[in-house]
Amino acid sequence: MLIVEAVILLVVLVLISNVISHYLTFIPVSLIQIALGLVMALFWEIEIPLDTDWFLLLFIAPLLFNDGRRFPKRELWQLRGPIFANSILLVFLTTVVGGYFIYLMIPRLSLSVSFALAAILSPTDPVAVQSISKRVKLPDRILHLVSGESLVNDASGLIAFKYAVAATVTGVFSFSHAVGDFLYISILGFLAGFVLMLMIEFLRNLLRQQGINDVIFNTVLQLMTPFVVYVITEEILHASGVIAVVTAGVVSHTQGNRLVEDSPELKLVSEKTWDIIVYLLNGIVFLILGDELPLATTKIINDVHFNTFQAVGYSFGAWLILLLIRVIWIYLYQGISKPRRPSLRVALLAGLSGVRGAVTMAGVLSLPLVTASGQAFPQRSLVLFVAAGVIIISLVAAVVTLPLVAPDNPVPLQTRASFSDELDDELDENETDQQQSNEPHLLSEAEARIYIMRLAINAIEEHRRIENQRAAYDLILDYQFIIRRLELKTRDDEDRKQVVDDEVTLRQVGLKGEQSALDRLYAHHQISSQAYHSASRTIKRAVQRINHPNRHLDFAPLRSWSSFLHRTSQWIRSAVHQSQNKATSNEWLLIDRESAKSAIKALSKYLGDDEVDPQALDKQAIYHLVVFYRNRVERARKDQRVSRSEYAKQLNQLRVIALGAERTGVQSLLESGNITWQMSGRLRQYINYSENVLMMAVNDELD
């Protein structure tokens, strides 16, 4: 298969895996990706050719650079000493002690290969570690320690792995030479990452002073940074590209850590772009792992020295060895860091948080196929199988133990592959803490958005005139769709069902009014038989949709879909009308206008009935449906039809007014104590995004 087709397939499978994980939330997305990789290998017989150099460059460099960009936080920086000590000493201990026990457990592995396996298994997935640690409520000091350690131990683990692999490939290992070489590549790698990042930042600032401040250009420059730093450090300086990219990431973070961003758009675009890059790279790594497993498993099955069950046992044994080393280390650290008696439960939970992730997999997949002598790398398939087994076991162990230790907090396990904005999680926790205090009642984000959107609708209504009614109703209708979706989220099941029932009742009344208008127009020979039957079929299908037995499950998407179908049918009619005579076009406009007017009259008559209590019905449902029909009336009025450019101008003017009302609403909620500073920031960011979209629309119109 061509490489382009393979990449497209891998990206599609990453998307599919996240769709599946949306429904199977108890299964980490990484396990789903491994399973899809297996399917890809077994059923499609697709093999991904791996090359050590490009694999490390493509996956390790951007992942570690991104880790550096997200480090350090204030709490982690305060523990920088213990964090770096754990990241180096614990990795060294895991490599030596863990490697030796793996060597004793698997005699077929040489000591150097055992060291390599233990070294590459020492890094932990930082997102998974934080996801587990927060959920099981570890003590703050332990939480910050294991979180910070997971951000740094990738580099130290990969360096130890590199030395062990080099010893296996060359067959030569000198302790004194290794120590000297380690100091050289580490120090020079650190300096290279530091200096190169400063040079890149200087170049970027110089270009911006020259007027080259395009957001896309600067985002691409940042994306290329880890690759440039890695290649220069590895190929020219022959130092550690791993340490260089981590250092460069940290420097990039500190350089951009300002109280006031001079280019907030660049910040937003680059952060979301990095999220996409990490999301794809991690998913592809686990897909490739699943694709490689059948090959490794086949070789193990055919191996005469041990069977498959032994290989599975080796994987479980290696995971247990690593777990014991981690638990003992955390237990001893507790005894040293605080005078109280250390907790074995905390140590065990911190140990179980050591989920292995993409860096481990990327490293083990980069094992060379042959040694310097030309012979096959010893037991490469077994190493791959055991590493994959440890990753899977660590993920499964976390999934199994989480409900036991945190039954009241059913948050799914996150890994890099299911990357979400870490800042949002922390802000949500802060808001929850504040809601538990005695401060004024805090609105949820959905409730706050509903409030500011209603203010926007009021502002549009105030500026609605005869000449801009179509644009006003279009914009109000869009706001109403969003409000209805948010309202359904904020209600419990019983209230939600009541709202849906009210909407269905009102919609049925409106459709009856539409049908009565059609019957009247047809009886007075104002429309043709073809138009009458076509419009009647449309109404009949709408009645069938809202009377569907499962309508109560989620009516808002149905309403949006109904609106989409209506607008699509209008577009098709318009296209057909252009090829037909003027009389036919007027006929359909008449149908749309009169049926909408009749529906409004039917709703008014229904609400005025003595047997109906309007106060018991959902007011927003009534308003939403009335606006829907008024919108149809305005679209079908010939005397008020304006040009496309004029309509766009009216729409944009009203959007500016609406966004201004939203911004005022956010400030009002903040001053009254109904939202937190963090939530106000998120709401303002949402408004900023909307303003950016508006500016893009304006620019498109000007072009």
Image (cartoon, rainbow, N blue to C red):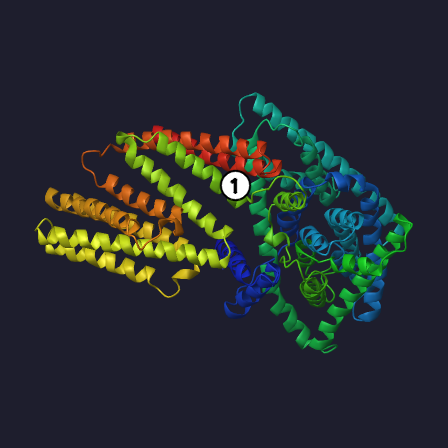
How many residues crowd mark 1 within 10 Å: few (<14), some (14–19), many (20+)? many
Q: What element carries label 1?
A: helix
Asked if residue 8 lies left or right of residue 561, the reply is right
Quarter assignment of residue 273: top right
Which residue is at the far front? Answer: 610
Which residue is at the far top? Answer: 210
Give the camera-side residue of 167 and 682.
682
Q: Mark 1 points at which residue?
A: 448
Asked if residue 585 lies left or right of residue 80, the reply is left
Give the camera-side residue of 122 and 443.
443
43 relative to 250, above or below:
below
Q: Residue 120: percent from the left, percent from the top?
A: 74, 56
Which of the image's four quarters has the C terminus?
A: top left
Quarter assignment of residue 667: top right
414 relative to 379, above or below:
above
Amino acid bearing label 1 = Ala
Q: Which residue is drawn at 82% across and 70% down?
A: 105
Question: Total label count?
Answer: 1
Q: Residue 139: percent from the left, percent from the top?
A: 79, 51
Q: Residue 373: percent from the left, percent from the top?
A: 75, 60
| Residue 218 appearing in the image | no
Q: Which residue is drawn at 51% across and 38% down?
A: 686
Q: Residue 15: percent from the left, percent from the top?
A: 51, 56
Asked if residue 274 lies left or right of residue 688, the reply is right
Q: Which residue is drawn at 40% across and 52% down?
A: 616
Give the camera-side residue of 476 and 214.
476
| Residue 526 appearing in the image | yes
